Image: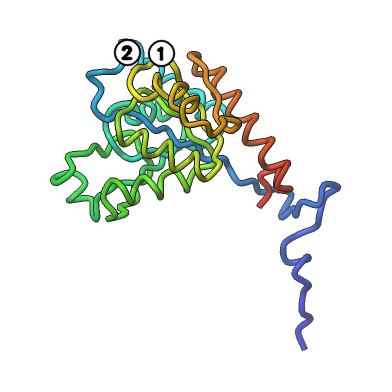
Amino acid sequence: MPIKKSKEKEQGKKDGLGRFENHNHTYHLKYKICVSGAAETGHCSKDSFEKAEAIGREIAKRDLILVTGATTGMPYWAAKGAKEAGGIVIGLSPAVSKLAHVKTYHLPLDYHDLIVYTGFDYSGRNLLLTRSADAIITICGRMGTLNEFTIGFEDHKPIGVLEGTGGTADMLREILEKAHRGSSNVVFSNDPSKLLDQVMKLVEIEEKRDGIHGKIL
């Protein structure tokens, strides 16, 4: 009669921190950072493209995963920066298929490792995009970016706003002040690296508070 293994033995032994080890490897979830920003960039600052690329590079350098709306503009340039730095980029498209993504929405396919075709148009895509991420970075932006910001804000997501990039990003501080809702989960900076540092501190604080810190799978 075969001997049944315990669930713990099947998963491997626990180390001193209570993590399961399997074949001398410990498995970690990677944090997903959404870059939300203007797809049409005529109103964005001249250096916003460079800053978006820098955000992408920083995300890749820190072994984080970039999540975008699989679109043009700021998210596209962030994806470019991440891929050129060897990172992983996942896109959530508003389209129902690859064909619709390209032919109907006129959206790009490059600089992404994986694109999920949600079929939920822009409003539904925005909801899935922000909720699939652990934190959000806002760069420039128009109404769609504001929509993604408010979804993330109501969901208490850590949000970083890259100021000095124009559009929505440069309005959000005033919007929060006039809305009288507080801004404890929102940080601001005009430096991509420093902004990501601040955002990841918020993620760590949130997970420690919720008792799930450590990225352990």
Depth order, front residue of 93/184: 184
The residue under label 2 is which amino acid type?
Ser
Helix, strand, or loop for circle 1? loop
In the figure, is residue 60 to the left or right of 40?
right
Q: Distance between the residues labelled 1 and 2?
A: 7 Å
**Within-10-Å neighbours for mark 1: few <14, some 14–19, many 20+:** some
The spot of residue 145 in percent (x, y) is 35, 33
- Residue at coordinates 25% horizontally, 22% vertically from top-left? 41
Check whether the beta carbons of the residues at disc 1 and disc 2 lie within 8 A of each other.
yes
**What percent of the width, then of the height, locates residue 76?**
32, 30
Image mark for residue 140 = none
What residue did someone put label 1 on? 164
The residue tagged 2 is: 45
Colouring scheme, one of rainbow, by chain, secondary structure, one colour: rainbow
Looking at the image, residue 196 lies above or below residue 22: above
Spot occupied by residue 45 in the image (x, y as percentages of width and height):
32, 13
- Report the side of 124 relative to 202 (left or right): left
Quadrant position of the N terminus in the picture:
bottom right
Type of amino acid at the residue the image marks with label 1: Gly
Q: How many labels does the image show?
A: 2
Which quarter of the figure has residue 38? top left
Q: In which quarter of the image is residue 10?
A: bottom right
- Report the residue that reaches farthest toward the left: 103
Asked whether, in this view, residue 200 is left or right of residue 175, the answer is right
Q: Where is residue 125 in the image (x, y as percent from the top left)?
A: 34, 48
Q: Which of marks 1 and 2 is nearer the N terminus?
A: 2
